[in-house]
Image (tube, rainbow, N blue to C red):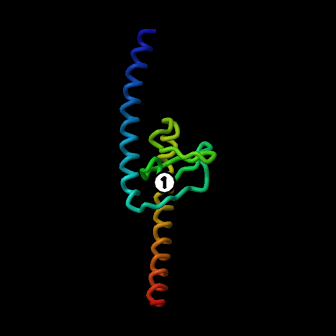
Amino acid sequence: MRDILEQLTEASAALSRESDELNAAIEDFEERLEPAGTEVWLLDTLLGYQLGFSKVDGRWCVALRHEGSVTALLKAPRKLRVEAAARFEDLASLMLKRVNELRAGVAAAKQLVKEAT
């Protein structure tokens, strides 16, 4: 029993360190997406949650949406953070697509305003 508890203590400490490293990686990812200032949501779900990038409590972050409620990924249970990380490339690709669509829309709007004046 003592050996198991010692192993559990060591494994728990390692899990905590690794979770902290995952959280730091999520924060780095958020910092890369933040300048776009654009809300996006993947269409499919992740364990019943929709993964996206949104403003939560006044801050842009990777978020989970479930039944109308939006939560920052960093406040979600570890299991969801682990699952979400596997979808970050999809989220970044969607963000790039949305930003390019918005750029095209802004360019068209500028042209319309220019022609009207």
Q: Is residue 104 above or below residue 12?
A: below
Q: Quadrant of the C terminus?
A: bottom left
Q: Nearer the viewer, residue 113 or 68?
A: 113
Indicate whether 69 appears above or below 7: below
Q: Position of residue 33 (x, y in %)?
A: 41, 57
Residue nearest the viewer, comparing 82 with 106: 106
Residue type, numbered disc 1? Phe
Q: Residue 45 or 37: which is nearer the viewer?
A: 37
In this rendering, the answer to whether 1 lies above or below 110 is above
Q: Residue at x 50, y 76 (%)?
A: 105
Q: Residue at x 50, y 59 (%)?
A: 39
Q: Which residue is identified by label 1?
A: 53
Residue 7, quarter of the rendered image? top left
Question: Which residue is depicted at the point 48% across and 41% down?
Answer: 81
> Where does the image place residue 15, in percent across and percent down from the top left?
41, 30
Q: How many marks?
A: 1
Where is residue 110 shown, x and y percent of the image?
44, 82
Percent position of residue 104, x then y: 48, 76
For this view, does 54 lie left or right of residue 46?
left
Q: Residue at x 60, y 42 (%)?
A: 47
